[in-house]
Image (cartoon, rainbow, N blue to C red):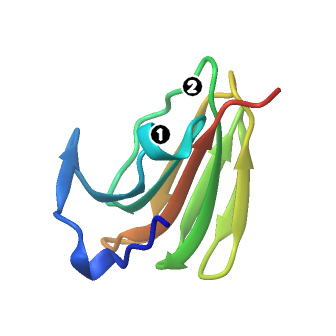
Amino acid sequence: MHLVHPNELPKEDWEGFPFQTLLDPDVGGQLGVYLLTIKESNPHLHEDLDQIYIVVSGHGQMEIDGQRKEIGPGCLVHIPHGKTHSLAPTGTGSVTVYSIKYRSP
């Protein structure tokens, strides 16, 4: 059984983003689950990984291939592999999301 609560995990850092790995791909196979706090995001893409954001707190503008949408707590965002995306928090705040990365068939 793999049971973990974010309060029990070490804080990590990826390019200035604080995050915690809830399910490492070494455990989850083709699936990784992270708790990520985004203060700013540069447009980028994942060649071979789809990604899902589940917004925990904060508000922002999600952009995927030039389309923008307002997001907030409870929103679920699917980012297909190969799509350029970024998330810009509203104002000076941040957006905390569960980030799920996986390889689609």
Q: Nearer the viewer, residue 31 or 34?
A: 31
Q: Looking at the image, is mark 2 or mark 1 earlier in the sequence?
A: 1
Q: Say which residue label 1 marks.
A: 25
Q: Amino acid at mark 1?
A: Pro
Q: What residue is rendered at 53% in x and 66% in y?
A: 60
Secondary structure at numbered mark 1: helix
Q: Name the quadrant containing residue 77.
A: bottom right
Q: Which mark is residue 57?
A: none
Task: Relative to 22, say whether 16 is above or below.
Answer: above
- The answer for how far apart the CA atoms under marks 2 and 1 are is 15 Å
The residue sitting at 33% across, 75% down in the picture is: 6
Q: Amino acid at mark 2?
A: His
Give the class, few, some or many, for how many residues have Cα within 10 Å of label 2's Cα (few <14, many ≥20). Answer: some
Horizontal and vertical percent for residue 14? 24, 42
Query: At 33% from the left edge and 74% from the top edge, which residue is drawn?
Result: 93
The residue where tag 2 is placed is 46
Q: State the image quarter where residue 38 is shown.
A: bottom left
Q: Which secondary structure lies at badge 2?
A: loop
9 left or right of 37 in image: left
